[in-house]
Image: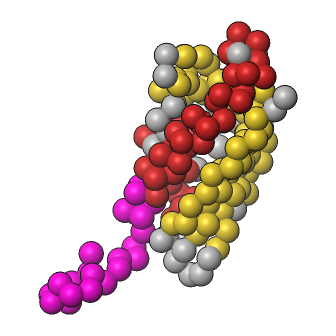
Amino acid sequence: MTTRLRVHTTFNASQETTWSAIEQIDSHVHWMADADSISFATTQRTGVGTTFDCRTRIGPVHFIDTMSITEWAPGASMGVEHRGIVRGAGVFTLRPLGKQRTGFSWEERLTFPWWLGGVVGEVVARPLLARIWRGNLARLKHIVEAQSPVRRQVPGNGTGRQS
């Protein structure tokens, strides 16, 4: 059995601003609660073929998730293949929702080893991972929108200032 997950959100920022927040792979530890550290196995740090190990922590479970970038379309998508203990594939997809709004989705297909519960582990992990990843996207949204030059008018503050 394979666990399929999809979480998504909308950023009040352009696709370019959104991409700039995710293209540095090692920066993902700043917004992914389940990613403790990332170390590259290749000298390459961006693009298809980049391979890295992500020390992953979900509750009391710690493991190394070996990943390789399989898709790299700046401003549009970044795909990975999980080649370690957990197997599968995932993709971040960005789509325009106007000039300064971007839809962001994160989809994964994951298979867990027997010692992580196999099929039962996958069933249990699905809602837990979905909750963790929704939190990850909330942190990423904060980072992306802080980088965006777009500021929204605060109604009723009487100052005319933007925030």
Majority secondary structure in the magenta region: loop
* Segment tinted magenta in the rendering: 142-163
**Residue 159 x, y percent position in the rendering:** 15, 87
**Residue 44 x, y percent position in the rendering:** 66, 36
- Residue appearing at x 65%, y 28% in the figure: 124
151 magenta-colored:
yes
**Residue 158 x, y percent position in the rendering:** 15, 89
- Residue appearing at x 69%, y 22% in the figure: 121
- Residue appearing at x 63%, y 52% in the figure: 7
Quarter of the image that includes the N terminus: top right
Quarter of the image that includes the C terminus: bottom left
Residue 34 relative to residue 42: left or right: left
Dividing the picture into quadrants, the one containing residue 105 is bottom right
Above or below: residue 100 compared with residue 105:
below
Above or below: residue 68 compared with residue 60:
below
- Residue appearing at x 61%, y 19% in the figure: 64
Closer to the camera in the image, 94 or 71: 94
Residue 146 relative to residue 141: left or right: left
